């Protein structure tokens, strides 16, 4: 057998041992690490699902396919692993990316005004339009009377005129 063949076998054995070691590490892992990782994944998922992506307009960080969004998701996971709270992360995102990253305003607290003011403006405008229509219809009086039916002479004359057209 050639020497090059031995090196290839040795390299393949090292690869197999590396794959086996990584697989064992993933399987065995400590139970505390699994629970901690699940908590981090849950908190990260909640953040990703509510924060708007600064890289994909109209998409949450969870659904944005850009590489920058993937980097930001990894950064958030690292912050959570270091012990940062969701509020701290949201505050930092607000400082760095602005108000838009926090998505639509909630209907609680100060965000309630953001929902109520447009609704009140629309209601007042609708009431004003309704009042204007009613007032203008009174000013010009009733419209033409509806036809109640034609007497036989008028019907015959109408049919003759229509026939001539």
Image (cartoon, rainbow, N blue to C red):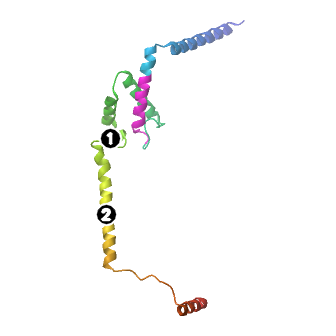
> How far separated are the C-alphas under marks 1 and 2?
33 Å
Q: Give the vertical position of 63 relative to 20 (above or below).
A: below
Q: Which residue is mark 1?
A: 99
The 10 Å Cα crowd at callout 2, few under 14, some 14 to 19, many 20 or more, is few
Which residue lies at the image location 48% right of the left edge and 13% below the top edge? 29
Relative to 123, is 23 above or below?
above
Of 106 and 138, nearer the camera is 138
For the point 59% across and 13% down, which residue is it? Answer: 15
Question: Whole-percent x and y of residue 35?
Answer: 44, 19
For label 1, count other residues whose C-alpha is less than 10 Å away and answer few (under 14), some (14-19) or many (20+): few
Return the x and y of residue 156 as percentages of the image width and height: 57, 92
Residue 119 lies in the magenta stretch: no
Q: Quadrant of residue 33?
A: top left
User: Which residue is pictured at 56% across the width and 12% down the height?
Assistant: 18
Considering every residue shown, the one lying at the far right of the view is 1
Task: Read off the residue under disc 2.
Answer: 127
Viewer-closest of 71 and 40 = 40
Extent of the magenta region: 38-56
N-term mark: 1 or 2: 1
The reply, left or right, for residue 68 in relation to residue 128 is right
Position of residue 48 measured from the top left corner of the image (x, y, whole percent)? 42, 33
Compared to residue 55, the image places residue 132 above or below, namely below
Residue 109 screen position, x and y as percent: 27, 42
Q: In which quadrant of the rendered image does the C terminus lie? A: bottom right
């Amino acid at each position: 057998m050639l020497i090059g063949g031995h090196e290839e076998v040795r390299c393949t054995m090292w690869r197999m041992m590396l794959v086996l070691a990584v697989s064992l590490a993933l399987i065995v892992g400590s139970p505390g690490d699994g629970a901690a990782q699940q908590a981090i994944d849950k908190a990260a998922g909640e953040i990703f699902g509510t924060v708007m992506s600064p890289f994909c307009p109209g998409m949450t960080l969870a659904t944005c396919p850009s590489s920058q969004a993937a980097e930001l998701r990894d950064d958030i996971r690292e912050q959570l692993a270091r012990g940062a709270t969701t509020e701290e992360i949201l505050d930092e995102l607000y400082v760095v990316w602005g108000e838009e990253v926090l998505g639509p305003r909630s209907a609680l607290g100060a965000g309630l005004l953001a929902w109520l003011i447009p609704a009140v403006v629309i209601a007042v405008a609708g009431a004003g339009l309704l009042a204007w229509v009613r007032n203008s219809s009174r000013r010009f009086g009733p419209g033409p009377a509806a036809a109640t039916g034609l007497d036989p002479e008028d019907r015959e004359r109408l049919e003759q005129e229509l026939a001539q057209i």
